Image (tube, rainbow, N blue to C red):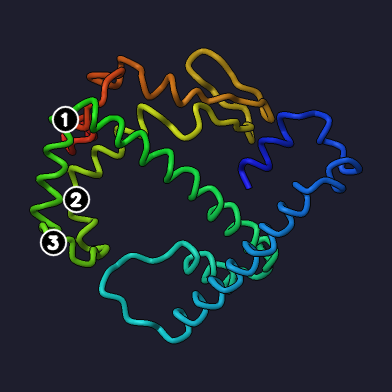
């Protein structure tokens, strides 16, 4: 899906629907969307069954789809089933790419900084064990050092280097006033490497996310 989307975006001659709709990529795109819609609908059914049957859980983790489903049932005048499907489609498709990128950069950082890799491995062995039994949500919540490592990977290599926002009202920022409905670009990459906030801004340093450091 990403490859198809990027391929069309990068080639202006594929932008007109009259051209794109007769190409093989269009059929591939439609097939993928069909399968994704089928998968999302099945996830919605399973979520509904979990909530209606009050399936007992051995942890406090609540899937996002369950939270959204419950919200929609209680606020049917604010969001419809089509919007629900679109939200889930966005979350599902985005998760694939982001997890792949984060995992790749995490492996890179551990390779470049073996001292932190050693600490993360020791924590995993202590909590999970050597024989890799089924890992539970409870186990994952105990991997505090690994969580710090992943957070610093995201700091160094944010999924989006910047985000776009629009102000809903006039906003005072120091001595400047940002007018209502102004477009704003937030440079996440620059903020994450600002020496005013980070001890080692250009290096992988999980201790940035120690509880004592976060409080500061």
Residue 181 position, x and y percent, is 69, 30
Of residues 209 and 21, the one nearer the viewer is 21
Mark positioned earlier in the residue sequence (1 or 3): 1
- Labels 1 and 2: the sequence-earlier one: 1
> Which of these two is toward me, 50 or 118?
118
Q: Position of residue 183 (x, y in %)?
A: 65, 26
| Label 1 environment density (alpha carbons within 10 Å; few <14, some 14–19, many ≥20) | few
The vertical placement of 148 against 136, above or below, is above
Residue at the image point whose x is 77% and y is 54% from the top: 27
* Residue 131 numbered mark, or none: 3
Q: Quadrant of residue 135?
A: bottom left
Quick one: which residue is furthest to the front in this view? 24
Residue 46 position within the rendered picture, expressed as x and y whole percent measured from the top left: 50, 77
Q: Which residue is mark 2?
A: 143
Query: Which disc is residue 47 wearing?
Result: none
Helix, strand or loop for disc 1: helix
Looking at the rendered structure, the secondary structure element under dot 3 is loop
Residue drawn where x is 39% and y is 39% of the image = 102
Q: Mark 3: give few (<14), some (14-19) or many (20+) Cα within 10 Å.
A: few
Residue drawn at x 32%, y 33% as measured from the top left: 153
- Circle 1 or circle 2, nearest the eye: 1
Q: Earlier in the sequence, mark 3 or mark 2?
A: 3
Describe residue 204's horizontal placement relative to residue 39 as left or right: left
Q: Quadrant of residue 112?
A: top left
Kindly state the secondary structure of the residue where label 2 is placed.
loop
To which residue does mark 1 refer? 114
Spatial separation of the CA atoms under disc 1 and disc 2: 18 Å
């Amino acid at each position: 899906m990403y490859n198809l989307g990027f391929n069309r975006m990068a080639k202006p001659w594929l932008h007109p629907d009259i051209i794109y709709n007769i190409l093989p990529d269009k059929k591939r795109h439609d097939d993928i969307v069909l399968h994704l819609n089928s998968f999302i609908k099945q996830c919605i059914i399973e979520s509904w069954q979990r909530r209606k049957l009050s399936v007992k859980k051995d942890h406090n983790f609540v899937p996002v789809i369950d939270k959204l489903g419950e919200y929609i049932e209680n606020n049917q005048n604010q969001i419809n089933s089509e919007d629900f499907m679109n939200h889930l489609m966005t979350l599902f498709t985005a998760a694939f790419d982001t997890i792949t990128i984060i995992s790749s950069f995490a492996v890179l950082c551990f390779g470049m900084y073996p001292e932190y890799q050693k600490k993360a491995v020791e924590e995993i062995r202590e909590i999970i064990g050597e024989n890799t039994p089924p890992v539970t949500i409870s186990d994952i919540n105990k991997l505090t050092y690994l969580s710090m490592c992943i957070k610093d990977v995201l700091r160094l290599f944010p999924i989006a280097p910047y985000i776009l926002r629009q102000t809903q009202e006039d906003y005072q920022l120091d001595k400047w006033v940002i007018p209502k409905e102004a477009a704003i670009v937030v440079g996440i990459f620059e903020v994450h490497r600002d020496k005013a906030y980070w001890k080692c801004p250009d290096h992988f340093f999980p201790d940035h996310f120690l509880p004592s450091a976060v409080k500061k």
